[in-house]
Image (cartoon, coloured by chain):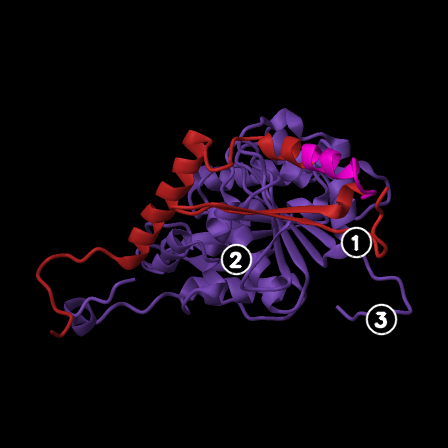
Amino acid sequence: MSKDLTLEEPLGKVIVVTSGKGGVGKTTTSAAVGAELARRGHKTVVIDFDVGLRNLDMIMGCERRVVFDFINVIQGDAKLKQALIRDRRLENLAVLPTSQTRDKDALTKAGVEKVLDELRKEFDYIICDSPAGIERGAQMAMHFADEAIVVTNPEVSSVRDSDRVLGLLNSITDRAGKTGAEPVKAQVLITRHDKSRVDSGEMMTVEDVLEVLAVPLLGIIPESKAVLRASNLGVPVVLDDPSAAAAAYEDAVGRLIGEQIEMRIAADPRRGLLQRLFRRAV
Amino acid sequence: MFGFSLRPRKAASANTAKERLQILLAHERSGSGGARPDCLPQLQREILDVIRRHMQIGDEAIDIRMERGDELSSLEINIEFPGKLGVN
């Protein structure tokens, strides 16, 4: 994004990472997408909307530095600047943690809107990490979104829940309610894709999932050991050692910001006999 | 010798995960180490009140940083004054 001082800076884009179903990779995706955007030079903030079950901080590795949170800001107990945690690896990246002690009722529509409006002025991208479910927290995370990344596993309950979430994006969001506004631009990100199981017919193909959901595909993230390792270490997967999952997230972020990148299904190389004998710690 | 071992060696990242959890949960459970939930907004207000008895500072002049550690936690409080000291 060019910074022309004579013109007013464009406002940042709000992107919700959502899924309905839990455990499909929303937080992993929020951390990876946020980190990759920041690495590409875009000012990015990732917000945890899962009030009461704070976890984005652990995945981003800043859990020991949380002082104030999103709810403190909404309730006026802290300024936004005081609650933002600046990433130590990437200067363009910040995290807005959520509260571990409150409940979802603390998220008010007016409060969320005020915080997002303030963030739009400072950041190019605002990534909203939605909680699972379709209750208040998830609805607040998607309400002011310009775009949505719907994280889906190639598995029946996940696809069904994604369909439900796509319906909500088209009906209950701010953009859905405004006449003349473009609808939320929703794209599917397929995660935990296992090519060998797809090839053997045990897992739905990408085409199967897209046929059911009928929205554009943002990317295909392969099942990868790198994801658990990154979570263990508190490092977004794109900032850890190279892996198929990291490469797939890099491609997905390229597409998210409008690059034409051919869709590919990556997989980590299988370990050879020698590597297994001389097992390297991962 | 050649990194070869019959015992399954525990992967390094799993140890990191366990250590991170132990440190974090110890703080969350005990509420000690300056991390009692929600005490920080109050602490911030009280610090501002005390300083305002002597100087004029704004609400945004205070910045509190925390680093929770295994043995030791630290709280870093920065207070910015206006260019000319606003002493009463």
Q: Residues within 10 Å of mark 2 (few under 14, many from 20)?
A: many
Q: Amino acid at mark 3?
A: Asp
Residue annotated with mark 1? A121
- Say left or right for A100 vs A124: left
Residue wearing tag 3: A4
The answer to the question of whether label 1 and label 3 lie on touching residues, with beta carbons closer than 8 A, is no
Q: Is residue A95 above or below residue A164?
A: below
The front one of B24 and B10 is B24
Q: Quadrant of residue A129?
A: top right
**Mark 1 belongs to which amino acid?**
Lys
Question: In terms of secondary structure, what is the magenta stretch mainly?
Answer: helix
- Measure how far apart labels 1 and 2 are at the Cα level: 23 Å
The span picked out in magenta is B45-57
Q: CA distance from mark 1 to mark 3?
A: 14 Å
Indicate the secondary structure of the residue bearing disc 3: loop
Chain that is purple in the image: A
Image coordinates of residue A32 in percent, x first then y, are: 52, 57
Work out which quarter of the rendered image holds the N terminus of chain A and state it: bottom right
Q: Return the residue nearer the eye: A75 or A15.
A: A75
